[in-house]
Amino acid sequence: MNATQPQSPTHLAKPVTRSTPVILPHKQRSYKPQAFEVTAKLAVNLLLSATAVAALVHLLPYLSSQQTKLQEMQSEVKSATHRVKQAKVQFDRNLDPRQARQIMQEQTNKIEPQQLQIVWTDSNPKSP
């Protein structure tokens, strides 16, 4: 009986032991510090949010008045641009040597000697 028996490899021959889980007494964890931290964070965030909303509410009337002022200024800029264009046209006309006689005639109501003055009259005057 001492015959040779097949040997199993040693690396696979680890004994398998099953242990039963040991139940340890459950420690009571205290969540109070975490609850306090979360509560403090929420309070700070709510305070910051309320402050931001209050600032926005105070800025809305200011925004409205600034938009009104901007519209007024834009209309004034348009009218000033129109006046500047008219003044530029008049300035260019006044400096044009070809129109010097016509400008003198407009400003002094004098006419050239070879030019005839025409006066329109009503041939049928209406009597009151």
Image: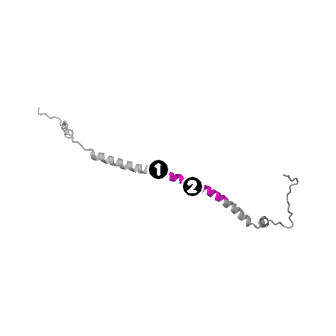
Instruction: Please give the name of the residue rendered at 73% of the width and 66% of the height, measured from the top-left corner.
Output: 94
Q: CA distance from mark 2 to mark 1?
A: 21 Å
Q: Is residue 46 left or right of residue 80?
A: left
Q: Is residue 111 above or below residue 75?
A: below
Instruction: Please give the name of the residue rendered at 67% of the width and 60% of the height, measured from the top-left corner.
Output: 83
Q: Position of residue 90 (x, y in %)?
A: 72, 63
| Three-letter amino acid code of the residue under disc 1 | Val
Residue at the left extreme?
1
Q: Quarter of the image containing the N terminus?
A: top left
Q: Is residue 13 left or right of residue 96?
A: left
Range drawn in magenta = 60-82
Residue at the front extreme?
128
The answer to which image quadrant residue 76 occupies is bottom right
Q: Position of residue 39 (x, y in %)?
A: 33, 46
Residue at the top extreme?
1
Q: Secondary structure at mark 1?
A: helix
Instruction: Please give the name of the residue rendered at 64% of the width and 59% of the height, measured from the top-left corner.
Output: 80
Report the mark closest to the observer, 2 or 1: 1
**Mostly what secondary structure, the magenta segment?**
helix
Q: Position of residue 119 (x, y in %)?
A: 85, 60
The residue identified by callout 2 is 70
The residue identified by callout 1 is 57
Which of marks 1 and 2 precedes in the sequence? 1
**Marking on residue 111:** none
